[in-house]
Amino acid sequence: MTSSSLPDSDILTSAIEKIQSTGILVIGDVMLDRYVTGDVTRISPEAPIPVLRQRKDSCVPGGAANVARNLAHLGCAVNLIGAVGEDEQAELLIDALSFLPQFTFHPIISEAKPTTTKTRFMASNQQLLRLDTEDTSAITAKQAEHITALASQMIDSTKIIILSDYAKGCLTTGLIKDIISLADRHNVPVIIDPKSADLSIYAGADMLTPNLKEIQIAAGEAITSIAEIEQFARNILTAHNIGAMLVTLGARGMVLVTGKTSHQISAHASDVFDVSGAGDTVIAYMAAMLATAHDNLDAAKVGNLAASLVVSKLGTASLCPGELLATHTHGYNVPSADAVQSQISDWQKQGLTIGFTNGCFDLIHPGHIELLQQAAASCDRLVVGLNSDASVKQLKGAHRPVQPQSVRQAILASLTSVDAVITFDEDTPLKLIKQLKPDLLVKGGDYQAEDVVGFDEVTSSGGSVTIIPMLDRYSTTSFLASHQLG
């Protein structure tokens, strides 16, 4: 049967809130993705090839490391295990991963193998050439045993395991079997992005996420119809005790097959700019959904939506929660300021404790969500003061906000921790605080309470001010900077 491409808005919002700090273990072929960008203004006199004048050399995590990066930006607590060489590329990859929040990389150092590196030479946002540096020979048995031992140490804090197989030598047949066995003993699901043509090596997994080309290679024939894909997938599931298979079909969407059912999920319309890493995004979001007890179909829809958003970006990229939530803001009716103030007044008459916090909330990220959840736990009703577009531009510069205030307001209003949202045009919310007279003023960050705007006004009327430490390394500015390749 054919299913809508979009997940239910309530399910999506609830999932993003539940996903925060969920423990996920990623094991597989980590890579360094390098982007050498520049300008082409002439053809070489030595050969009929373009001459690239380099402007920038950027490095981002690729392969299994990109899967982990997606999860970290979503808000999960991530452990990543992968093999790297004793080389400069390993240092660059480790450095790129060091900036990720709630993230720990456990590199397996290989003296014999270089760090897998894909170098893309680009001009005018187009690839001119890709240079791959790799050794696809298998890691040693001792290294595989080390990975299994590390996974055993982390299993109690892990809700799901992802095996990201790029056929670069990390995921040996024996290691895959050992990890699946370990997970089974601890009742932890395993989801695998497979690369081997022999799908039997993934026996016992909970889900596989191949693309069409990969299942055609596994089948040994060019199966293309939905019926053929479903039948092949079901045969594999039955033969090898695999729970489900999600086959990604590019512009045709996805097909989710279980032992008894199948769903065709149409592609979510988007402007495709770069498909690099789209499969990484799918498996990351699928795993995060499954780790928080959502079913396969809802997980597939969220993975489908996330992939449609990430392919509109340049290079190997990731998302933040605000980008997903923005897809469900159409049709939201922004209440007037008078209506919001009237509602707050009613709550105050009922004797409810009113909490207040404020910010730009541009591209909602896990740090925002953590702040709002903690603030909501300290009061009966949480009101958010939202900087208007004009106010954000004044504070952040002409290039901000990324999302207009109507979208930011709708996203905030959809969160279960938020009871009301009201915008203000000034640089600070002081005028709004005087008007609303909240019982509790909440500020996220490293502040002294008495330095918070509104401290005197709230405390003089018997209220209090609470400082909530922000989750380390989450910010809209740093997220945007990490996606600037040109």
Image (tube, helix red, strand yellow):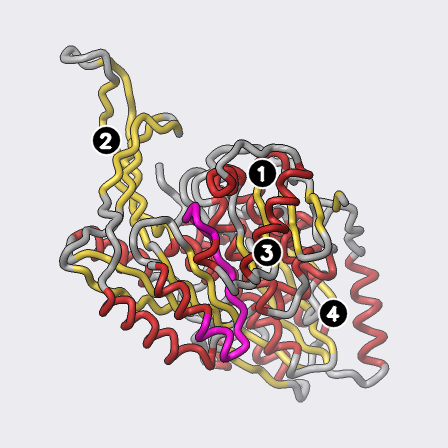
Residue 410 spot, x, y in % from top left = 71, 55
Quarter that holds the N terminus:
top right
Q: Is residue 88 visible?
A: yes
The residue under label 1 is: 249
Secondary element at image label 3: helix
Amino acid type of the residue that numbered disc 2 sits on in the rendered structure: Gln
Identify the residue at horizontal 71%, vertical 69% (top origin): 416
Q: Which residue occupies the extreme bottom position in the image?
A: 462
Residue 5, image x, y percentages: 70, 45
Residue type (three-letter) at the residue carrying disc 1 = Leu
Check residue 191 for magenta coloring: yes
Foreground: disc 2 or disc 1 = 1
Disc 4 target residue: 419
Query: Which stretch did the figure color magenta?
Result: 181-199
Q: Is residue 398 above or below residue 16?
A: above
- Mark 3 or mark 2: name the one nearer the start of the chain: 2
Q: CA distance from mark 1 to mark 4?
A: 40 Å
**Which residue matches tag 2?**
54
Q: Which numbered disc, 2 or 1, marks the residue that appears first in the sequence?
A: 2
Q: Residues within 10 Å of mark 1 (few under 14, many from 20)?
A: some
Near mark 3 (Cα within 10 A), the count class, few <14, some 14-19 or many ≥20, is: many
Q: CA distance from mark 3 to mark 4?
A: 45 Å
Query: What residue type is disc 3 on?
Result: Leu
Comparing marks 2 and 4, which lies closer to the viewer? 2
